[in-house]
Image: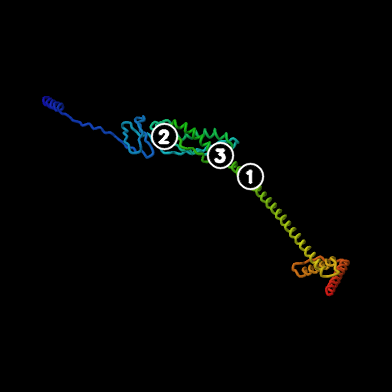
């Protein structure tokens, strides 16, 4: 129809002359990642290593395949490994090795440390087991305690040589503990205690010997001095008696030395009896008890009295 055709032509004409203007905008999605102090972030693009990110805040663009695939620590790390092994004298002992290590802060060495090793601690632990179990079986148990430095040096040399390839620096290796079986430990303590007791008994016997010897020497010296004093005392008594007899003979005529000695012995006898009777603490004295002894004592006293009277009469003349 004419009307429909006219409308259609008009619509077609309007469509051809209509222009649409569109503004294109590119939206890029960006993310932030923060790396802690003492660590480096590992940035990869589409799975391939790109760079190391130092501590701080960094921009990554996930839409372009950039991602933070991990971190690597530059701090000094410590690993304690307990190794059970056997000594040369067939004693099982548990040795604890403490290792301090650090990643070398060089880009290529950090790359080796992150990508060459999946488990660095497991690798270090394997090397420690290998070195300890090849070194300690050549040493006796008593020598293990004195060879701690040698064992630690063997472990460090092996680790330093092997782990440097993977970007790790072995700072130090220490043997922190050596623990044999409790029964073996008790036996070692008993042996040590027995040795010390033997030494103590020897020293004690030596001390007792010295005491006995010194006591004997002191007793001998005491007896020597006592005998010397007694001999001097008797010598003095003899000298006094001799002087008394000589003086008595000069003063009294007709008196022999024998008479003077008998009189002096009687005087000593009566002095002794007096001391026994007057001093306290004397409970027993020995007195001749036979009839003949009584007669002898009576005769001796009578003779002494007569000699005394004769001496007095002679002095009066």
Q: Position of residue 308 (x, y in %)?
A: 84, 71
Q: Where 269 sits versus 95, above or below?
A: below
Q: Secondary structure at mark 1?
A: helix
Of the image marks 2 and 1, the number of the one nearer the N terminus: 2
- Residue 114 falls in which quadrant of the image? top left
Viewer-proximal residue among 44 and 219: 219
| Residue density around tag 3, few if under 14, some if 14–19, many if 20 or more, within 10 Å | few
The image quadrant where one finds the N terminus is: top left
Q: Position of residue 214 (x, y in %)?
A: 69, 53
- Residue 186 falls in which quadrant of the image? top right
Q: Which mark is residue 101?
A: none
Q: Where 9 sits versus 104, above or below?
A: above
| Residue positioned most to the left | 2
Q: Is residue 233 left or right of 63 when viewed as pictured?
A: right
Residue name at image x 53 percent, y 41 percent: 177
Q: Is residue 35 left or right of 162 when viewed as pictured?
A: left
Residue name at image x 49 percent, y 33 percent: 157
Q: Calculate the distance from the C-alpha at mark 3 to the C-alpha at mark 1.
A: 20 Å
Q: Position of residue 309 (x, y in %)?
A: 85, 73
Q: Secondary structure at mark 3?
A: helix
- Residue pointed to by mark 3: 146
Q: Calculate the distance from the C-alpha at mark 2 to the C-alpha at mark 1.
A: 52 Å
- Residue pointed to by mark 2: 104
- Residue pointed to by mark 1: 195
The image quadrant where one finds the C terminus is: bottom right
Circles 3 and 1, Cβ within 8 Å, touching? The answer is no
Of the image marks 3 and 1, the number of the one nearer the N terminus: 3
- Residue 273 falls in which quadrant of the image? bottom right
Residue name at image x 25 percent, y 32 percent: 26
Q: Position of residue 64 (x, y in %)?
A: 31, 31
Q: Secondary structure at mark 2?
A: loop
């Amino acid at each position: 129809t004419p009307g429909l055709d006219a409308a259609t032509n008009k619509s077609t004409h309007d469509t051809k002359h209509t222009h649409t203007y569109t503004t294109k905008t590119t939206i890029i999605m960006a993310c932030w990642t923060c790396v802690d102090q003492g660590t480096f972030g590992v940035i990869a693009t589409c799975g391939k290593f790109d760079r190391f990110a130092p501590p701080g805040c960094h921009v990554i663009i996930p839409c372009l395949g950039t991602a933070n695939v991990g971190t690597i620590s530059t701090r000094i790390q410590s690993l304690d490994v307990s190794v059970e092994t056997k000594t040369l004298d067939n004693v099982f002992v548990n040795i604890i090795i403490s290792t301090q290590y650090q990643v070398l802060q060089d880009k290529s060495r950090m790359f080796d440390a992150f990508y060459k090793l999946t488990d660095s601690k497991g690798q270090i632990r394997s090397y420690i087991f290998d070195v300890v179990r090849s070194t300690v079986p050549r040493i006796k148990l008593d020598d293990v305690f004195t060879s701690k430095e040698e064992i630690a040096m063997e472990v460090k040399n092996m680790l330093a040589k092997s782990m440097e390839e993977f970007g790790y620096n072995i700072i130090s290796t220490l043997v922190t503990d050596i623990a044999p079986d409790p029964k073996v430990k008790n036996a070692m303590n008993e042996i040590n205690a027995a040795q010390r007791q033997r030494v103590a008994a020897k020293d004690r016997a030596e001390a007792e010997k010295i005491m006995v010897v010194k006591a004997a020497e002191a007793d001998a010296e005491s007896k020597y001095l006592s005998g010397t004093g007694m001999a001097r005392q008797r010598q003095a008594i003899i000298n006094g008696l001799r002087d008394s007899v000589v003086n008595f003979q000069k003063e009294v005529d007709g008196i022999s030395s024998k008479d003077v000695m008998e009189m002096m012995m009687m005087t000593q006898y009566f002095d002794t009896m007096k001391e026994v009777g007057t001093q306290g603490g004397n409970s027993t004295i020995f007195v001749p008890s036979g009839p003949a002894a009584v007669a002898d004592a009576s005769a001796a006293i009578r003779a002494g009295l007569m000699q005394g009277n004769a001496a007095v009469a002679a002095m009066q003349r």
